[in-house]
Image: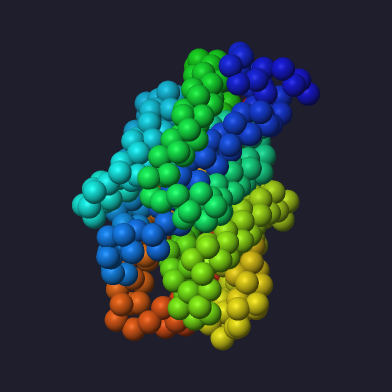
Amino acid sequence: MSSQPATSLPGAPSPAAQGTAFRVLSAISFSHLLNDMIQSLILAIYPLLKASFDLNFAQVGLITLTYQVTASLLQPVVGLYTDKHPKPYSLPVGMGFTLAGLLMLAVAPNFGMLLVAAALVGMGSSVFHPESSRVARMASGGRHGLAQSFFQVGGNVGSSLGPLLAALIIAPHGRGSVAWFSVAALVAIFVLFHVSRWYAGQRAASKGKPAARRGGRAHLSRGKVTLAIGILLVLIFSKYFYLASISSYFTFYLISKFHVSVQSAQVHLFVFLFAVAAGTMIGGPLGDKIGRKYVIWGSILGAAPFTLMLPHADLFWTGILTVVIGLILASAFSAILVYAQELIPGKVGTVSGLFFGFAFGMGGVGAAALGQLADATSIDFVYRVCAYLPLLGIVTILLPNVEGHKTPAVA
């Protein structure tokens, strides 16, 4: 197995059969880390924004809704377009939107401008995720689950760093210090430029032989594929609605129930999100080995006993349970995404855009809806209700066994 062009960012491309391009995967995963770290700063500074602008929980939820719905509405459109017209250099351009949103977040004078800043960050993600997911699949060397997990773990590590950096940097120095993180966006633009060169080289090398890039096709009727996609979206709803309750309101929950400081609550959120990052790396490779349906089943439904215990736990066990929940629940997305890509071969951008977009949308809708519920009842009640969401994992039983119904890939 050659290790030359397949793993060199700016160099000449080579077929995926030569092996997994880990240098490319590392670069796109690192960019994902920086992108999602910037996004998570918005969530992490919610207590600061709430105090500075005198926001209620519904307005806090509206910030999340704005940037996640912006991303969710645009991602499928971007994915569909780039399936037909690939745009390798859209990756650094998308990060430019994120950079603009970040700078605006640091200086926004009112709530309306906060929403504009959040929308710009969402637009950046809408461009980044479908195309970077395509790059991950191109660099996979056939190990699609591993590649998606490798890509995803970068994003989840970045998400976990946001609360920690907010506690260490933004909380002591104020909202204006958010602008310091523009350096991260500039680094990501530089890295993504080189990834785009590799991507463009792969595109040039594969012209005239598109079949060589496709994997096996599932022998399923259109109706069964539609049903399976619908089931996967129900599972995404369950996962991301629950995650919204943690990512948007966990700091408030800890402060309200256990009277911890803002910085202590942000550290607890970091621990949870880091567990999510660790869990992400499990699902893809495990799905490559034992089948993605089993990973999806265990990840969603397997979290239910722990989510049901969480609202009744003390502070110590709350920390333990959130780590377990993060590890288990996070392993699903890579498996779900690759499963969906195998249901609809040749539509990597469309599928990635649909599922990333729906995940973002459910996170946004969840944050807004749960904010309304928290205002009407209490934060504690929100967690009692959300505890039942992973039970929706039972619908996984209706998914067809894609791995058992493939034709061989075209050589």
How are the residues colored?
rainbow
Regarding residue 392, the answer to whether it shows in the image is no
Q: Name which quarter of the figure residue 374 lies in.
A: bottom left
Q: Name which quarter of the figure residue 80 lies in.
A: top left
Up/down of 39 relative to 131, above or below: below
Residue under the point 52% across and 56% down: 167
> Which residue is more in the foreground, 377 or 44?
44
- Residue 168, image x, y percentages: 55, 52
Quadrant location, the N terminus = top right
Up/down of 97 relative to 260, above or below: above
Left or right of 14 in this view: 233: left
**Residue farthest to the front?**
173
Left or right of 102 in this view: 34: right
- Residue 81, image x, y percentages: 34, 33
> Which residue is more in the foreground, 149 or 223?
149
> Which residue is more in the foreground, 168 or 181?
168
**Residue farthest to the bottom?**
312
Numbered disc total = 0
Q: Name which quarter of the figure residue 217 lies in.
A: top right
Residue under the point 65% across and 20% down: 8
- Residue 151, image x, y percentages: 58, 41
- Residue 306, image x, y percentages: 61, 77
